[in-house]
Amino acid sequence: MLDYQKARDWQSGEVRHDYAPRDTMLYALGLGLGADPLDERQLRFVYEKELAALPTMAAVLASPGFWMRERREIGIDFMKLVHGEQALRLHAPLPPSGTVIGRTRVTRVVDKGEGKGAVLHVEKELADVEGRALATVESVYFLRGDGGFSRTDGRSDEAAAPAPATPEGAPEQVLDLPTRPDQALLYRLSGDLNPLHAEPAFAARVGFAKPILHGLATWGIAGRGLLEAHAGLDPARLVAMRARLSAPVYPGETIRLESWRNGNEVAFRARALERDVLVLTHGRAKLR
């Protein structure tokens, strides 16, 4: 059973991550940039001359690994864990290469009740070696096998405020973002080596027709699309971004980004076009 206090007390300590221009370019390729090598706006993310880093790369830098599986004493049933939401706040532009420090901690553990699961909020603060804040990254996980943990001592955090719903009606802006059949194989080279995204037999054992795209890749592709649709692909203009990961994408599908803009605020969702399935919902972004 999940131990509330051990979960709330968990911290990663300092995680140091050295990355090179090659890593920044590989991350961008994993999100589909460079598909048009004649588009100079895309080229700046995948070519070392005047290289720029995508802001969503903060999600994969200085991460603590799959600690929920390794720290068995916390009691998380990691086989029933689902990545549910992802959020990012930028405090400064990410350098295209260098060294960053990540410190990750649990900020909220919510018991939804026996048979209903639990919700785990994890926050990473990313800074450079001089201590300058670069980004705050939040991941929310649905722990489908861990509901009811509070019945022993009554301890559970209050649920977070619900995310605003996506606007009704037709979107104001639509952008189609194709993915490659090998998109997951490219994206996994940025750090997430889960065989679910590479091995057909493993994917079949857990109920998928074939390997699926990483949720963070879908989220990152949406971030790239927001920059393209609303910011001229200028990475410095993204201030914050949040979305719920509602369904997986199969590599080779087209991600259709649908958005509504109100000043510097953008509401968005994304769907796998070929299956007409929403893969991101409750999306919100803020631009400079």
Image (cartoon, rainbow, N blue to C red):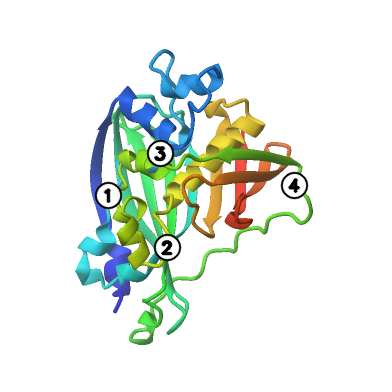
Q: Are marks 2 and 3 in contact (CB under 8 Å)?
A: no
Residue bearing mark 1: 64
Q: Are marks 4 and 3 in contact (CB under 8 Å)?
A: no
Which circle, 1 or 4, is nearer the viewer? Answer: 4
Task: Give, as a three-letter code, the residue at label 3.
Answer: Ala
Residue bearing mark 4: 171
When the figure is inspected, residue 71 is found, relative to residue 19, above or below; the finding is: below
For image coordinates 54% across by 56% down, the residue present is 244
Task: Tell which residue pokes out farthest to the top in this image.
Answer: 49
For image coordinates 48% across by 20% down, the residue present is 43
Q: Are marks 3 and 1 in contact (CB under 8 Å)?
A: no
The x and y percentages for residue 31 are 46, 37
Dot 4 or dot 3: first in sequence order is 3
Disc 1 is placed on an element classified as: loop
Which circle, 2 or 4, is nearer the viewer? Answer: 2
Which circle, 2 or 3, is nearer the viewer? Answer: 2
Task: Tell which residue pokes out farthest to the right in this image.
Answer: 169
Task: Give, as a three-letter code, the residue at label 1.
Answer: Pro
Task: Give, as a three-letter code, the residue at label 4.
Answer: Pro
Residue bearing mark 2: 208
Dot 3 or dot 1: first in sequence order is 3
Disc 4 is placed on an element classified as: loop
Local crowd at mark 1 within 10 Å, few (<14), some, or many (≥20)?
some
Disc 2 is placed on an element classified as: loop
Question: What separation in Å lies between label 1 and label 2 (alpha carbons)?
Answer: 27 Å
For image coordinates 39% across by 52% down, the residue present is 123
Residue bearing mark 3: 58
